[in-house]
Image (cartoon, rainbow, N blue to C red):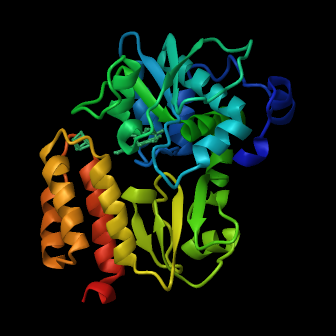
Amino acid sequence: MRPLLDAAARSEDEHIARNGPLPWPSIRGALIGAVQEAGLTGRGGANFPTWRKLARTAVTDHPVVIANAAEGEPASRKDKVLLEHCPHLVLDGLQLAADAVGADRVYLYGPKGIVVPKRKSDRHPIVHVTAPDAFTAGESSAVMAAVAGRPAKPTDRGRDDMLVQNVETLARIAQIARCGPRWFRQHDTYLATISGAVRRPGVYEVARGATVQQLLDLAGESEPVKAVLVGGYHGTWLRPHDTIADPGAGVAIALPAKESGLARTTEIVRYLAVQSVKQCGPCRFGLPALAEAMTRHQWPQVNQLVGLVDGRGACHHPDGTARLVRSAMAAFEGEWR
Ligand SMILES: Cc1cc2nc3c(=O)[nH]c(=O)nc-3n(C[C@H](O)[C@H](O)[C@H](O)COP(=O)(O)O)c2cc1C
Ligand code: SF4
């Protein structure tokens, strides 16, 4: 088994020749323990231990498994690239997860036009559900709503009988099933979409624990970089020498030294305010007020509003926005002072 992107194969035969068959039936019943031992956490942004989600769903009646390929984050491409290059690993992971939790229905939730190969070996037929092009459409309760035939909007609670996993998480499950937890711990990588002030923007496979500078070196700085937004629009601004403790969904946007970090963050917050579904107070009133205060450079109000929206929504959209603004206020202190 190779790093994820080196395992690319279009046809099922090529996939098996390259990566080997799945070790049925020995993996059945052992998968959740193997995922726990491997220490796999979700690659959709929240970094939650995957085995806990599998175990929680496995004790429910008639559960379903949903592969989340919505990739609503504007600067992210890794799920698209993964599905294009390694669809079989994602499909293997989906089948393995369905088997481990005893699901009889499996779904692939992704943008219009997404195509995955049909395979004779699959034990569960895959139902495709189209994800609308919206930032919050990939949030797990929005995914569950869409699969249940309702609008793809976040709601106030998830359901244990619906397991939503990011497509990269599923591909990682397929790696663990083939190579075991020990191999996985030694080859713990994540897919990163690197963009902004770099010569070769794109998707790279990065070792966990890499520094921001190592990511910049992979993609080649095109000009001096002031800071990098790691984790996407709900992420954190880091300096090149910082170690990336939590890559989130693997997005890294390099800000040129000549640009204002606060201006860039304000643009993002305005986008996030527009993208919110406006069902809860912090989204309906808080995020637009925050965007407005940032646009007017009213920094004391910005600090106050961040405290007011944080943790007050039904989903984590306001929390992610608060995290972004807090990190901008710390990283670009010189700008607002
Ligand atoms: C506003 C918002 C948008 C999200 N969008 C996505 C998305 O597009 N794709 C995704 O995989 N996870 C997204 N997530 C994370 C999901 O809620 C969920 O944690 C994830 O899909 C679970 O899979 P994982 O445990 O494999 O990461 C989003 C979360 C929030 C709060
Ligand atoms: S916090 Fe915002 S995005 Fe989340 S459910 Fe409420 S209105 Fe929707």
Nearest the camera: 239 or 196? Answer: 196
The residue drawn where x is 79% and y is 32% is 10
Nearest the camera: 93 or 225? Answer: 225
Nearest the camera: 32 or 318? Answer: 318
The residue drawn where x is 65% and y is 78% is 222
Left or right of 117: which side holds 276? left
The residue drawn where x is 78% and y is 25% is 21
Residue 30 visible at all: no
User: Quarter holding the N terminus?
Assistant: top right
Taking 311 as reference, is 333 above or below it?
below
Q: Picture quarter containing residue 313?
A: top left
Ligand 2 - quadrant of the structure image: top left
Location of residue 329 in the rendering, given as x and y in whole percent from the top left corner: 28, 76
Nearest the camera: 250 or 102? Answer: 250
Taking 140 as reference, is 27 above or below it?
above
Location of residue 106 in the rendering, given as x and y in whole percent from the top left corner: 52, 17
Q: Picture quarter containing residue 84?
A: top right
Numbered label tally: 0
The residue drawn where x is 67% and y is 15% is 122
Taking 275 as reference, is 200 above or below it?
below
Residue 115 visible at all: yes
Location of residue 67 in the rendering, given as x and y in whole percent from the top left corner: 52, 29
Location of residue 303 in the rendering, given as x and y in whole percent from the top left corner: 17, 71
User: Quarter holding the C terminus?
Assistant: bottom left
Left or right of 171: which side holds 166? left
